[in-house]
Amino acid sequence: MKLTDQILRQIENSERLTKQLTIVEKFSAPNLTGAGAGIERLQRMQKLAAGLDLSKYAEAARLASGALASVKASMVAGSDLSETMHKLTEVPSALKFLQDQAARYEQLFRPTAQQDFLRLSEVAASLTTPKWPSQIALLGDNIQRQLESIRAPLIQMQDSLRSLRGFGELSAIGAAVRSIEPFDPSLVGALRRDLGDWRDAEAEPAELIDDPGGRVALYEERGFNVELTEFPAEGFESALVATGIDLGAVNDALAPPPAEMVPAFNVHAYQWLFVFEGELRAFILKRLMEAAGDDWEARLPSGMRDRWQDKKAKALSEGECEQPLIHYADFADYVDIILGKANWRDCFKSTFKREEAIREGFNRLRPIRLMTAHMRFMTHEEWLILNLEVRRILRAIGIRI
């Protein structure tokens, strides 16, 4: 490689470093039960740090730093912390390096200031056309009220307009997913331009399950708008709440999972996916029974009923309580049922409008469901997609959040 090529490669690595420093997801400290949970989380972070090629993936700094900070904050007062504190002294130098990088990254941001509000009309005008449907009126004062509610650092000091554009886009998305029909072509197209094109996505990236940086790169390759997530963790979470994207806590009316089922990792993601799948199964069963009555199982794709029966038999042999047969569906089964030729025509087209649109929604959710099931760290990109797609599909099947 020529010297000039080496220099260009270093520049590319530096740019990716800056982008992916944003991938940390804060974890819910109240859901940890004691020092043992902190040790497990710290060990996972040490494994992640030890496996990083720092010359290429040092951008994962905020992931490591934020998770380590949550371990310290989550320790229960009065519990036996000796083992945990011993583990904290064994943090490898790689993790310390990542922490230092994270601190430097967060120092690049500041809270909003008066000069930011003066530029909001410019930002709003750039978002309303041509991408977003005309139903979404982005008035500067609406965005200003949302910005004023955020106290955490959010604005890049070296490129404030970039941060304002990203926030303005989140504001537009939040308004759209709450007010436009979930599978209206204009909304589907607008989300595709911001979240990426997932119509022909292959199976979930299982090989990237322990590589959040690689997953972020994959999302960017599909066209994810990186400006949506280029914020420090606290600022990003505040932005999702302010713009109405955040799903919030699962209320009791939606039948959340029993507390003993919920892992300490990705608590809200687990709860919402549990609710999402439960409501979706009920919707699918209702539509199939409307079309075929008690013979609804005949409308399942070939071999699917037998797989469910096998899973049910195994669950019962292990002492689990019996559930309706559709309870044993896999995540990939839902879209296969919906897009079955006769099922689509008779049962689901009126709800989801276009086959490619509902397929794309499930393709976006599939890797996120995998990360949640395996209790892996979620990136900002994954948390944003989960909030948007779960809300959109639940709205489509008649569930109001």
Image: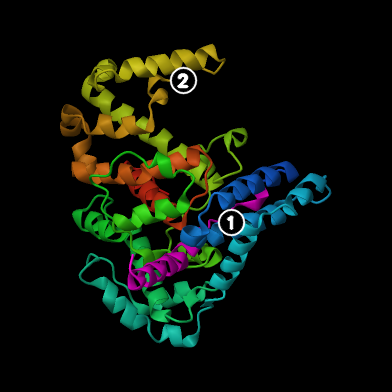
The span picked out in magenta is: 1-30
Type of amino acid under label 2: Gln
Residue to which mark 1 is pinned: 64
Residue 66 appears at what percent x and percent y?
Answer: 60, 59
Residue at image location 50% in from the left, 63% down from the top? 21
Is disc 2 placed on a helix, strand or loop? Answer: loop
Residue 339 appears at what percent x and percent y?
Answer: 22, 33
- In the image, 217 versus 340, the foreground residue is 217
Determine if the magenta segment contains residue 4: yes
- CB atoms of marks 2 and 1 within 8 Å: no
Can see residue 18?
A: yes
Is disc 1 placed on a helix, strand or loop? Answer: helix
- In the image, 361 versus 393, the foreground residue is 361
Determine if the magenta segment contains residue 216: no
Relative height, residue 398 to residue 164 (above, below)? above
Q: Residues within 10 Å of mark 1 (few under 14, many from 20)?
A: many
Which quadrant of the view contains residue 73?
A: bottom right
Q: Earlier in the sequence, mark 2 or mark 1?
A: 1
Residue at image location 54% in from the left, 35% down from the top? 257
Relative height, residue 114 to residue 13 (above, below)? below
Q: Quadrant of the N terminus?
A: bottom left
Residue 83 appears at what percent x and percent y?
Answer: 79, 45
- Tell which tag, 2 or 1, sits nearer the viewer: 1
Can see residue 171?
A: no
On screen, residue 293 versus residue 392, left or right, reads left
Residue at image location 23% in from the left, 66% down from the top? 131
Q: CA distance from mark 2 to mark 1?
A: 40 Å
Q: How is the image coloured?
A: rainbow
- In the image, 183 versus 332, the foreground residue is 332
Type of amino acid under label 1: Ala
Residue to which mark 2 is pinned: 323
Mark number displayed over residue 352: none
